[in-house]
Structure formats: C-alpha cells, structure tokens
Amino acid sequence: MERTLAIIKPDGVSNGLIGEIIKRIEAEGIKIVGMKMLHLDRFKAEGFYYVHRSKPFFNSLIDYMTSGPIVVMVLQAPDVINRWRKLMGATDPKQAEPGTIRAEMGLNIERNVVHGSDSKDSAMYEINYFFKGTELVD
Ligand code: IDP
Ligand code: MG
C-alpha cells in the first residue's frame, strides 16, 4: 500500500471541478484518507515548491498557488504515486494524454488544475507538509 499527496489547485476549485476530480479518483478504486481545504500564504506555498525556487516561473507559480483556496488530499492505494500522475496527465495540458484531468481541464502549463507527488520521498515530505498523523484515517 502506498500514499501520495494530491492537490486541487486554485483554478480547479474556482472553476467548480472538485467533485469531478474526486469522482475520477474514487472511480479508480483509490481511497482518500485525508482531506482539507486551505488558502496558502506565500510562505507556505514557497516551502511546498522549494525545489523549484530557482526556476524562472517560481514567482508566478507562487502567485497562482496563493490566488485562492485549494483542496489537499492524501490518496492511498497500491502504486498510487504513478496511478495518480497518470490520471493527472503531463504538466503541460497540451502534451497531456487525451482523457486525463490536465488534458481536459488544464488551462496552460502553469494553471494545470492538479498536483501529485512524483516519488516516494516527495510523497512523504508533501504529506507531512500538510497533515499530522492524527489527521489521516486508515
Ligand atoms: P508537475 O506538477 O507535473 O510535477 P513540476 O515540473 O513539478 O510539474 O512543476 C510544478 C508546477 O509548476 C507545475 O504543475 C506547474 O503549475 C508549474 N510549472 C511547471 N513548469 C512550468 C513552466 O514552464 N511555466 C510555468 N509554470 C510551470
Ligand atoms: Mg512536480
């Protein structure tokens, strides 16, 4: 059994896509074992995207991620890190496989609706960044 962090980003929340995205997660047999709605401040968003701090798009990414509420979730299933990234599609909606969330709902390479951890190490860091152990169910 594996866990990953999923985020419905501000464009997903403001465009009314929370239900559609959760429906796709549950339809895959993936369990949601933690969930909360938050509005990130710059400090919290910068810490989350620390690995991207020297990228040219960093400031714009932080503007975007602090622009409105988000939904953060912990997903649990076998191989869920890869499975959730497959459901999301490639970072750039134009390159994403047809049928994926980003292909169907993403606006551009920045405003791409959803986040998913990319490895076991990042999943552990990202889950702990938003959730205490007592906030997760089993
Ligand atoms: P990922 O979300 O598919 O793992 P990352 O490369 O980790 O993609 O980038 C994190 C986030 O930064 C992306 O989801 C997207 O919102 C934003 N981003 C990535 N590359 C670019 C870019 O070239 N221009 C603008 N924003 C970008
Ligand atoms: Mg990433």
Image (cartoon, rainbow, N blue to C red):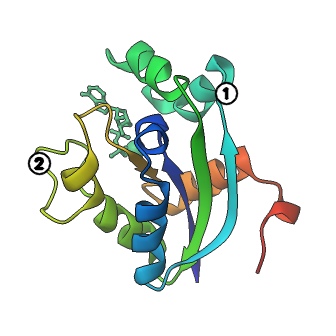
138 displayed left or right of 102: right
Dot 1, how many residues are within 10 Å of its Cα: few (below 14), some (14-19), or many (20+)? some
Give the x, y percent position of residue 84: 40, 67
Residue type for callout 2:
Gln
On the rendering, which quadrant does ligand 1 occupy?
A: top left
- As helix, strand or loop, the secondary structure at mark 2 comes to loop
- The residue tagged 1 is 44
Does residue 3 lie above or below 118 as drawn?
below
Give the x, y percent position of residue 135: 82, 61
Identify the residue at horizontal 31%, vertical 14% (top origin): 56
Measure how far apart labels 1 and 2 are at the Cα level.
Answer: 29 Å
Query: 43 or 38, which is in the foreground?
Result: 38
- The residue tagged 2 is 95
Residue type for callout 1:
Lys
Q: Quadrant of the N terminus?
A: bottom right
Mark before the other along the chain sequence, 1 or 2: 1
Residue 53 showing in the rendered view: no
Identify the residue at horizontal 59%, vertical 48% (top origin): 71
Does residue 60 lie above or below 52 as drawn?
above
Does residue 41 lie above or below 51 as drawn?
above
Query: 15 or 41, which is in the foreground?
Result: 15
Identify the residue at horizontal 66%, vertical 54% (top origin): 127
